[in-house]
Amino acid sequence: MRRWHRPHSVTGFQLFSIVATVIMSLVAVALITAMALERIESSGFLVVLCLAFLASPLVGRSYYSRGVYVGEKGIRMRGIEGKRTVRWAEIAQIKSGRSKVADETDPAIWVILKDGERIEAPLKGSHVLPTLGMMRTEAGFKVTERPSLVLPMNEFHGALNILRECLAKSRQGQLQIE
């Protein structure tokens, strides 16, 4: 039994981050080996490049682990701000609503706590999937750090329904995560 389970699929961007991480790590190891065997001349640039490539698994893992997870104890949300776990007993409602990001109109998942706090989960739905890190603006395109995973609308609604079902089952004491 896994402790935490994604109610949504892994996105193409998440898979790309893992593949890029593996490639960058292999290139770094090859360059370090070549420098150690004196096949190529060691330079400050190559050393910095190798260090950057070796640090890439941290970035890749961070992006890959973004999203929403369910477990027997509650919901875990991982975004660029970090992770937050909320127990099922603290949750009043799970709903879909407009994102708090000003220029986004796509729906987001909101977790409403019994104390009134509203938490925007790092998961959004979209009819048109975005290109890598690009958002359309009045003046054209701008590069942004997307705070959330963006899923096709059918997958977004599927994840929302799973979260709602888990909340209902937890209230009845029948929640089991496989």
Image (cartoon, grey):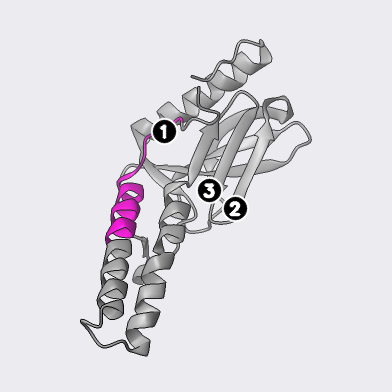
- Residue drawn at x 41%, y 33% as measured from the top left: 8
Q: CA distance from mark 1 to mark 3?
A: 18 Å
Left or right of 59? Residue 80 is right
Q: Answer few, some or many: residues within 10 Å of disc 2's Cα (few below 14, many 20 plus, some between 14 and 19).
A: few
Q: Answer few, some or many: residues within 10 Å of disc 3's Cα (few below 14, many 20 plus, some between 14 and 19).
A: some
Label 3 element class? loop
Residue 107 at x, y percent in the picture: 47, 42
- Residue drawn at x 44%, y 60% as measured from the top left: 59
User: Which kind of residue does numbered mark 2 sit on?
Assistant: Gly
Residue 10 falls inside the magenta stretch: yes
Q: Nearer the viewer, residue 111 or 62?
A: 62
Q: Answer few, some or many: residues within 10 Å of disc 1's Cα (few below 14, many 20 plus, some between 14 and 19).
A: some
Query: What range of the chain is rendered magenta?
Result: 7-23
As drawn, the label of residue 82 is 2
Residue 174 at x, y percent in the picture: 61, 10
Residue 138 visible, this orientation: no
Read off the residue under disc 3.
99
Q: Quadrant of residue 70?
A: top right
- Residue farthest to the right? 115
Q: CA distance from mark 2 to mark 1?
A: 19 Å
User: Which kind of residue does numbered mark 3 sit on?
Assistant: Ser
Q: Answer yes or no: do the residues labelled 1 and 3 have beta carbons within 8 Å?
A: no
Residue 113 at x, y percent in the picture: 71, 34
Eyeballing the image, is 91 above or below 12?
Answer: above
Read off the residue under disc 1.
8
Q: Quadrant of residue 60?
A: bottom left
